[in-house]
Amino acid sequence: MGEIRHHRKQKFTSRQIETLSGLAAGFTTTIVTHPLDVLKIRLQLNHNKLELRSKPFQSVIEIIRQLNKDARSSTYLNLKHQRCKTPFPMNYLAQYYRGLTPNLIGNISAWGLYFSLYAEFKKNLNLRNQSINYFLSSTLAGISTSILTNPIWVLKTRILSSSKTTENAYKSTIDGIKQMLNQEGILSFWKGCIPSMFQVFQASLQITIYDNLKNYIVSKKDKNLHSNHHELHMLTTWQYLYTSAVSKIISTLIFYPTQVVKSRLQNYRSTIEISKKISISSVIKDLYFKEGGISAFYKGLSANILRVLPATCITFVVYENVKKWLIEL
């Protein structure tokens, strides 16, 4: 059966399969988990000192209350100005899905680009040590993707950080682009790019753990089936779920502080805070000395874990299954 599959001409090239699988994974994940992304960004940008005795998830609850308040305010303004075209429940969706456009564009392009580049680097490097090959390939793919998509993430962070009614808030993606170009220049689109490089290493660590776990499971299958065709043995959905979850949890705990620093840098606007010079070192000092020490670097971790676990599982399950489907077409 393996020989038949090997000689049958596929409808899509390997590059097209990787890209389309990544696009599908990015789209599905973003639609499902975007509200959690809003919570995570708001938590990361919260400048209040952490209260160690506060109730669990108190900050999350406060942000949810604020989002609901903004939704009610939006409904009141629409009624006041007789703009009743938007149904009341849609105002809540608008708050929790604010910034969906740049998030969709960013995730779809990033995952499509990342998976296709990762496959290319993995094939061309072809190092003897599999773990090193996975890590280097994913690092090169991650750096390339991060540099190319950073402007989208800056826009996403700024839009998600506030409601439309907030002073100086971006009204739309286009409005954000215009304001950034006019007020801060084109280089502002690459704010937070250096901390993003640390996230590349997080993704590289995750993908290395993930692929090694997959290989371990496949090798156990090979022993039972006496076969050398690793690529033909698909994992079950449950196996994809726990391998992606384990790899994501480990990598997130190690590299999460860089996400908080990156969000702070990307949300900074020179025209509003012109008197305050913002740098990586100043952000780190503020977090550590003014906002609660080491624990400040893990702001939003609870929401992030709740978000990344389903997001990661959805991403890899959709990616692997769409890839399988395209190969079999």
Image (spheres, rainbow, N blue to C red):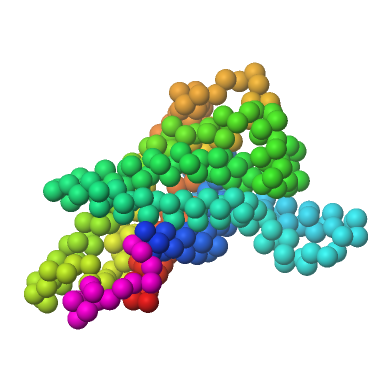
In the image, residue 140 lies in the stretch drawn in magenta: no
Q: Residue at x 20, y 45 (%)?
A: 132
Residue 204: tell me if it is visible: no
Q: Residue at x 56, y 53 (%)?
A: 105
Q: Quadrant of residue 211?
A: bottom left
Point out the residue furthest to the bottom here.
1
Q: Residue at x 14, y 66 (%)?
A: 219
Nearer to the camera, 105 or 82 = 105
Q: Quadrant of residue 222?
A: bottom left
Q: Residue at x 47, y 64 (%)?
A: 24
Nearer to the camera, 48 or 254 = 254
Coordinates of residue 32 in the picture (x, y in percent)? 53, 64
Give above or below for 96 relative to 184: below
Coordinates of residue 126 in the picture (x, y in percent)? 20, 49
Give above or below for 16 relative to 173: below
Nearer to the camera, 116 or 234 = 116
Quadrant housing the N terminus: bottom left
Coordinates of residue 305 in the picture (x, y in percent)? 43, 53
Magenta region: 1-14
* Side of 100 relative to 290 (left or right): right
* Side of 289 relative to 313 (left or right): right
Quadrant housing the C terminus: bottom left
Nearer to the camera, 249 or 204 = 204
User: How many marks on residues?
Assistant: 0
Give above or below for 279 relative to 313: above
Residue 217: tell me if it is visible: yes
Coordinates of residue 248 in the picture (x, y in percent)? 34, 53
